Amino acid sequence: MIDLDALDFAKTGGMVTVVTQDARSGQVLMVAHADREALERTLATGEMHYRSRSRGLWHKGATSGNVQRVVSLTPDCDADAVLARVVPAGPACHTGARTCFGADAAETFGILDATIGERASAMQAAASNAAGATAAAPSYTQRLLADRNLRLKKLGEEAVELATACVDGDHARAAEEAADLIYHTLVALRAVGGSLDDVRAVLDARAQGGR
């Protein structure tokens, strides 16, 4: 995956800079440092390890569970920095954000998809509760997940409303209808066992194919 002997650890006091990127979306998640030991642990375990002067050697996600599974490690042209492409199990930032570089569209979509997933999990948990337990009123998302005809009807309606707004040249309404369509699309996808990660994988494959 990477030749550690080819890295220039001496140039920056025994460590190299690591730029960690989501392998699926291309989003930069964080920047940290690693010494040879950290990269050796990374290669041995398949999960990112870093080194800091304050924390020493640390395994990303060891306490939070937000591990980063390594896809590839690539040195830069000067051999003093490494691009780590990973599949994160959760947020990269200590603030709880997906990335240390602030919210963007990718993070917003991820949060929305995660919320829909939580609603679906709550439905499953409620369905397995003991008989006689008082169930909370379902949310709108849960109503859509439970009713195939309703969610497909709403999906079609939102698509038509977006098309109409575009025909009318109404920028503000088109943006609102696009947001509604994205939401209903993610709900419909979740209902058939899919998620935003599946969409990212398809887009990544198409991008690599030059489409």
Image: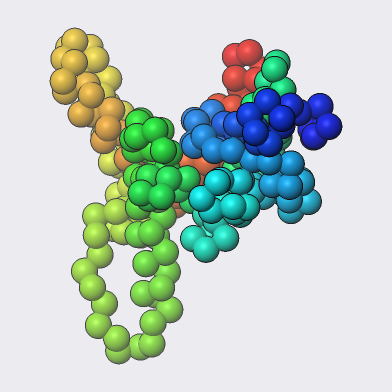
Seen in the image, is 107 located left or right of residue 86?
A: left
Seen in the image, is 116 located left or right of residue 50?
A: left
| Position of residue 159 measured from the top left corner of the image (x, y, whole percent) | 31, 29
| Position of residue 180 measured from the top left corner of the image (x, y, whole percent) | 26, 35
Determine whether 9 is above or below 191 in the image.
above
Determine whether 176 is above or below 92 in the image.
above
Residue 13 in sight here: yes
Q: Quadrant of the N terminus?
A: top right
Residue drawn at point x = 72 percent, y = 22 percent:
79
Q: Quadrant of the C terminus?
A: top right
| Position of residue 82 measured from the top left corner of the image (x, y, whole percent) | 66, 29
Name the foreground residue: 209 vs 9.
9
| Position of residue 78 measured from the top left corner of the image (x, y, whole percent) | 70, 17
Residue 24 in sight here: no
Q: How many marks?
A: 0
Determine whether 128 is above or below 58 in the image.
below
Residue drawn at point x = 38 percent, y = 59 percent:
118
Seen in the image, is 17 located left or right of residue 111?
A: right
